[in-house]
Image: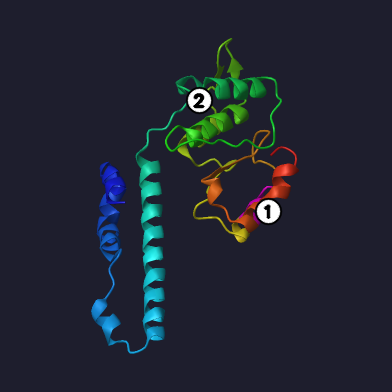
Amino acid sequence: LETQLEKGKRSGAWQADSARINSEIGALGAVNLAALEELETSQQRKTYLDAQSADLTEALTTLEDAIRRIDRETRERLVKIADIVGQTPVVRTLMNAIHTNRLHQAYLFTGSRGIGKTSIARIIAKAIRCPDTKWDGSWLRCCDQCPSCTEIARGNSVDVIEIDGASNNGVDHVREIRENAKFLPSAGSRKVYIIDEVHMLSTAAFNALLKTLEEPPPDR
């Protein structure tokens, strides 16, 4: 964890979190042996150790969330389809689907960390929503000037919703997605949901999302 957190030092976010993160690192593995020896029965010691374990688990979760956030903030994002390198078959398939208006209701991007899954999802969302997306014979190109393109680039589009599946992994969060999906997009023809770290959703949350994935409302 310390090695991974060192990579985040180039981000300004590190300065704000450094004291808290360092204290969490110091807490990992720290068990108060003196307090443990004062406990008389094995049951009391077990209860104490269980509480310590819960605290350490919470500290570890906090650190993993910090790593994930710093990594997202410091990574340089791709901005157009022509910038994508090394994913030619996938990109070509998606471009053809957009160009012929034969989109499916959901796409699952898989692969190791840092290969561009979220970046490609954003680019595809931009291509889907841009009213001036054009085919030049080799690539689909967005105008990058319309309100939809600029809002997606800034990350504040109300019709392209990004959700962190690692921290919003419960049934209640999925129910909120299902309720919001019923509403039409504020502009354009489609509303896009990008669920990052979707594998972190709980089993119950996946089951709650299944119906919406199989039969999404029109224009989603």
Q: CA distance from mark 1 to mark 2?
A: 37 Å
Residue 218: give x, y in percent of width and height: 75, 39
Residue lying at the far front in this picture: please name it: 42
Residue 203: give x, y in percent of width and height: 62, 56
Image side of residue 3 versus residue 201, left or right = left
Residue 149: give x, y in percent of width and height: 53, 30
Q: Indicate which disc residue 82 carries.
A: none
Snapshot quadrant of residue 146: top right
Q: Is residue 194 above or below residue 175?
A: above
Q: Indicate which disc residue 144 carries.
A: 2
Identify the main secondary structure in magenta. helix
Residue lying at the far bottom in this picture: please name it: 40
- Work out which quarter of the rendered image holds the C terminus and state it: top right
Q: What colour-coding does the image apply?
A: rainbow
Residue 162: give x, y in percent of width and height: 54, 44
- Crowding at dot 1, Cα within 10 Å, few <14 / some 14-19 / many 20+, comes out as few
State the residue in front, 10 or 30: 30
Image side of residue 209 versus residue 31, left or right = right
Snapshot quadrant of residue 110: top right
- Crowding at dot 2, Cα within 10 Å, few <14 / some 14-19 / many 20+, comes out as some
Which of the two discs, 1 and 2, labels the residue nearer the N terminus? 2
Q: Secondary structure at mark 2?
A: loop
| Front disc: 1 or 2 | 1
Disc 1 marks which residue? 207
The answer to if 180 sits in the magenta stretch is yes
Task: Identify which residue is drawn at 56% across, 21% down.
Answer: 89
The answer to whether residue 209 shows anywhere in this view is yes
- Magenta stretch bounds: 174-181
